[in-house]
Image (cartoon, helix red, strand yellow):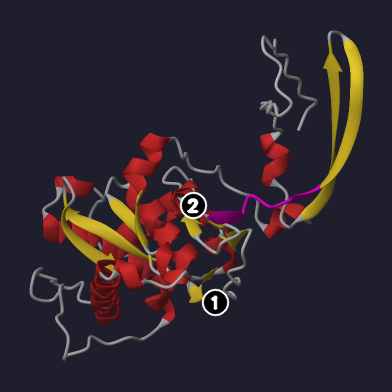
Amino acid sequence: MRASTQSIRIKNYHPSLIINVSAQWRFSRLARIQQRMPAELTYTLYANGKKVGKRTDMVQVDSVAACPYAYVNAKGHIHSLAPFFVAYVNGNNPALDGILKQAIKDGYVKQFDGYQANAAGVVQQVAAIWLVLQQRGIHYSNIAAPTVEPGKILYQRVRSVDQSLHSAQANCVDGTVLFASALEHIGIDCDLVHPPGHMFLRFYAAKSHQMPLYLETTLLDAHAAVNSHLVNPVGKAFPWYDLRDRPFEAAIQCGCYEAAALAKVVAGAKSMTAKEQLCSIISIAKARKFGISPIPALPTSADHR
């Protein structure tokens, strides 16, 4: 950050006074921090034009890729910060155009027109993106879940669209925000579903948030098959023509099954554990209205050679 100052006029002095200073961030520099690093923060206080004192604190600077998603207070109660995950959904990322171009070139769809298509056409567009990501070899890459400690902020590292595509790796959060970014790019509404220690996608096959379907993105690199003992929400509802891809249907089926299980957990909220208190469905549209904007494309490891 640059040197920042704040001037105030106090009418009635109080021994406990909090002054909020608007820091002048160097956003391009912050974006290049890839791991936690220490920094010194120095404050100088002046009163009536005279220097009162100076103090230096050692602080830890986290990478913008470290998303704070919950705060645990001293009593162990969890306060969700999960809407911050929406910052990693970036429908304006230029890398998404390559995915759409490849889907059209390979004949999965003729065009990406969002809700100008009917519900079957919308699901075909989602399936086309799925097929391209499969072809690009996106693999599931798990990360260790942080422990829930009192007085702590819980973080999770989230790859940007560029980083997931560049490394061909994605955990549940990475894959969900990658898919959500692609759907936001073509105008299909979606939400982030956040059960304890996991995340998957909800998208709407019809406009005005009608016909919700759920997608388990961790099955991208799996040869999953539809479970004949469970309801298949895709096969009976949509004509698939030459786009019948069983792993995609299985991912929809798995997502819908997980969503039903999550609904049962939320219904029994009085008996939820501390981790289950983090259950939430994060509306991307509401988070955007609240002011959570997309983080600009982050540099990949190739940019630091």
Q: Amino acid at mark 2?
A: Leu
Q: Nearer the viewer, residue 145 or 160?
A: 145
Is 61 in the magenta? yes
- Asked if labels 1 and 2 touch by Cβ distance under 8 angstroms, the answer is no
Q: Is residue 101 among the parts visible in the rendering?
A: no
**What's the magenta region?**
59-70
Which residue, given by chain and number where applicable, does mark 2 sit on? 81
Q: Residues within 10 Å of mark 1 (few under 14, many from 20)?
A: few
Query: Helix or strand or loop: what does disc 2 sit on?
Result: loop
The percent coordinates of residue 186 (x first, y second) are: 31, 47
The percent coordinates of residue 150 (x first, y second) are: 61, 64
Q: Which mark is residue 142?
A: 1
Which one is earlier in the sequence, the residue at label 2 or at label 1?
2
The tally of labels here is: 2
Above-or-below relation of 51 to 108: above
Location of residue 228 (image quadrant): bottom left
The percent coordinates of residue 34 (x first, y second) are: 71, 55
On the picture, is 52 further left or further right than 59?
right
Q: Residue shown at 71%/16% (left/top)? A: 13
What is the quadrant of the N terminus in the image? Answer: top right
Above-or-below relation of 57 to 123: above
Q: Amino acid at mark 1?
A: Asn
Is 91 in the magenta? no
